[in-house]
Image (tube, helix red, strand yellow):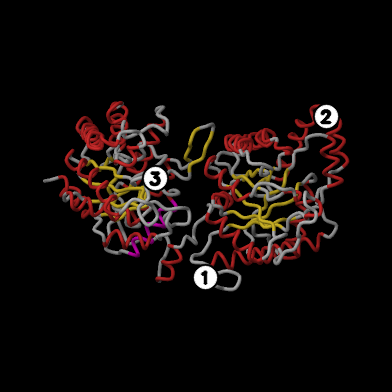
């Protein structure tokens, strides 16, 4: 029996086929820098590749992918290796076959074919026929070397992927897995939904339609269900990342554990996946746990999410069910630690990014990016959010003041935020321009915070603008609102808070708290009048730096009141006032940790080290798993 027939028989059997996990992550863990050419290691460091293959086979993988993901002429050209396409691909297949032979595993080799690394027209300058020839060259090398099937993976351009499928079908009769990666909105980078992808790829001749990489196991379960509804007769593969990557201590880390992956392996099988594996961040341990989880599980018609109509399908495909990391942490009961950063006044962002990396390493869950705090000119927070998420790997919350924006700018800015990957929005009135660098600047606004929250949650998140006109697709914003605890009119403040919650607010950020009883009293007053608050609260925590700092805040910053006893304690600390400020901040969090969902730290004077110390201290006191 040929291996092609064996693979098709495996598909037809209804039993899930276990694939391997990440190659690049394992190579990096063995000291290979990300900027190296991983594919060339087939020639220069074959023992590394062989060792990784063998570990996955011993973990139970029945399909292992040759280390050829980037071995096409375009990607290899960036390393001066474009003339070694055949040699590198052949070596990759040979190493995979050697691993199977030496372990005695009943497994097949998939020739891994990633995106070309250049954009195809009309979004780039590579013509359709040029893309086809590049795919054909690599796939020919893989087939001649003895690959058992072709895995076109981590693709984001469906038309580029279609050229790869067609090239594979012309080269020979090897089965083809065509797998797409999705953004956190359940769309490709070019905006296609899982339903659209599944239909196009199946019609183009893929033997298996897949989803890989992307955000993590939960997202790809949702994507799988959408694809299966769109193409009921199809065969499907799922190979998620181990969650979203985060940078910790200078290393890229993935949070999803092997046990967590095992739970989803079973769910994928029940939802109809034929091939299950892992992508970035997954290890042989993940694969071993998945093998144990799927043993004896039969593919069924079970759907974790019920999809009854085409409207439901489009809702799933549009990403409306997507969750931000912040919302997921709240939902899991984890005590959330958020830190505010101020954008720079000039062009340099290096200090800010260094601070964000420090906070990420300390264990911060999210970074809040202020918008012109104290009405002082700063870099656009959109740019800072994008840089932090892209370069540090930590999710952000964009502060979005209504002051100084008309409806045109508000809506345009929302579209810009969503396009740059920002999903958490903190809606606030904003500081009056009269106190800032440009007191003569306009201070007008067309919408108050509760109105903007309603516009986002009931307008943009439903796919329409303020006038009800379609914006092309629904956004997936998670929206926070402000709560001022230092007010003489508590009744008015809780009435405003109720309006914000009724408008759709998802969470609350408070002004800095120095008297824990204030927030407890305010929440109690709200619940006595309106019932349970119903949304998580992040309490503002501002570590004091010194007595001058404390007196300035108390006397000149609206919404902040510092008790005399605390001012005396800071004054008595003298040169050790910053340490005293950190200690008091930790004490306040300790007193409130059972009453609120998390802390919102505002480090003074960009002293991110103070915030990091607080985060580490709080984390040490939390029970395993991070919940309170």
Of 403 and 509, nearer the camera is: 403
Circle number at residue 470: 1
Question: Where is residue 351, by image quadrant?
Answer: top right
**Residue lying at 33% horizontally and 60% vertically, measured from the top left:** 198
**Separation of disc 3 and disc 2 at Cα?**
52 Å
Q: Residue at x 17, y 48 (%)?
A: 4
Magenta residue span: 218-230
Q: Nearer the viewer, residue 183 or 298?
A: 183
Residue that label 2 marks = 573
Residue 482 screen position, x and y as percent: 71, 56
Query: Of residues 490 and 425, which is closer to you in this image?
Result: 425
Residue 235 covered by magenta stretch: no
Q: CA distance from mark 2 to mark 1?
A: 58 Å
Specify the principal SS of the magenta part.
helix
Is the residue marked by circle 3 packed among few (<14), some (14-19), or many (20+) residues within 10 Å? many
Instruction: Tell me: residue 579, above or below residue 322.
Output: above
Q: What kind of element bears circle 2?
A: helix
Tag 3 residue: 262
Q: Secondary structure at mark 3?
A: helix
**Relative side of 479 to 103, left or right:** right
Which of labels 3 and 2 is toward the front?
2
Q: Upstream in the sequence, badge 3 or badge 2? A: 3
**Residue 301 location (% of width, % of height):** 33, 62
């Amino acid at each position: 029996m040929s291996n092609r027939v064996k693979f098709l028989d495996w598909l037809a059997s209804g039993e899930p086929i276990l694939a391997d996990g990440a190659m690049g992550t394992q190579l990096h863990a063995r000291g290979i820098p990300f900027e190296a050419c991983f594919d060339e290691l087939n020639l220069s460091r074959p023992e590394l590749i062989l060792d990784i293959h063998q570990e996955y086979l011993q973990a139970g993988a029945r399909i292992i992918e040759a280390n050829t993901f980037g071995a096409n002429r375009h990607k290899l050209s960036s390393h001066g290796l474009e003339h070694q396409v055949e040699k590198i691909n052949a070596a990759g297949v040979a190493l995979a076959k050697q691993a199977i032979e030496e372990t005695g595993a009943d497994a097949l080799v998939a020739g891994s074919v990633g995106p070309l690394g250049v954009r195809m027209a009309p979004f780039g300058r590579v013509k359709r026929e040029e893309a086809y020839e590049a795919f054909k060259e690599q796939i020919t090398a893989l087939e001649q070397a003895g690959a058992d099937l072709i895995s076109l993976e981590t693709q984001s351009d469906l038309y580029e992927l279609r050229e790869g499928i067609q090239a594979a079908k012309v080269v020979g009769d090897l089965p083809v897995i065509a797998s797409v990666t999705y953004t956190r909105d359940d769309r490709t980078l070019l905006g296609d939904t899982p339903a659209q992808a599944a239909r196009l790829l199946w019609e183009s001749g893929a033997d298996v339609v897949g989803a890989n990489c992307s955000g993590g196991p939960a997202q790809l379960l949702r994507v799988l269900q959408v694809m299966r509804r769109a193409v009921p007769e199809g065969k499907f593969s799922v190979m998620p990342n181990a969650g979203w990557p985060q940078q910790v201590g200078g290393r890229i880390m993935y949070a999803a554990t092997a046990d967590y992956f095992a739970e989803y392996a079973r769910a994928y099988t029940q939802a109809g996946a034929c091939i299950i594996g892992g992508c970035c961040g997954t290890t042989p341990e993940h694969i071993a746990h998945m093998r144990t989880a799927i043993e004896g599980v039969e593919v069924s018609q079970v759907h974790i999410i019920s999809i009854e109509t085409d409207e439901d399908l489009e809702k799933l495909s549009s990403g409306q069910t997507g969750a931000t990391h912040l919302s997921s942490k709240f939902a899991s009961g984890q005590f959330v630690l958020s830190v505010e950063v101020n954008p720079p006044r000039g062009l340099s962002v290096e200090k800010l990014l260094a601070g964000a990396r420090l906070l990420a390493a300390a264990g911060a869950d999210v970074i809040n990016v202020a918008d012109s705090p104290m009405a002082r000119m700063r870099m656009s927070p959109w740019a800072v959010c994008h840089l932090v998420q892209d370069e540090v790997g930590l999710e952000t919350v964009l502060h979005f003041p209504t002051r100084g924006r008309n409806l045109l700018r508000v809506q345009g800015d929302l579209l810009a935020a969503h396009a740059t990957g920002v999903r958490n929005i903190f809606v606030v009135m904003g500081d009056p321009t009269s106190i800032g660098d440009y007191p003569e600047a306009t201070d007008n606004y067309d919408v108050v915070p509760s109105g903007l929250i309603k516009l986002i949650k009931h307008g943009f998140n439903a796919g329409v603008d303020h006038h009800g006109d379609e914006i092309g697709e629904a956004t997936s914003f998670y929206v926070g609102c402000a709560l001022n605890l230092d007010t003489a009119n508590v009744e008015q403040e809780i009435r405003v808070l109720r309006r914000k919650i009724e408008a759709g607010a998802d969470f609350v950020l408070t002004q800095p708290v120095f008297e824990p009883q204030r927030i407890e009293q305010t929440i109690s007053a709200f619940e006595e009048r309106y019932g349970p608050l119903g949304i998580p609260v992040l309490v503002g925590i501002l570590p004091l730096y010194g007595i001058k700092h404390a007196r300035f805040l108390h006397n000149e910053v609206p919404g902040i009141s510092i008790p005399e006893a605390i001012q005396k304690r800071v004054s008595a600390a003298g040169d050790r006032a910053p340490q005293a400020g950190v200690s008091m901040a930790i004490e306040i969090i300790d007193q409130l940790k059972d009453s609120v969902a998390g802390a919102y730290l505002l480090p003074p004077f960009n002293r991110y080290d103070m915030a990091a110390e607080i985060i580490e201290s709080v984390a040490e006191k939390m029970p395993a798993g991070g919940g309170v």
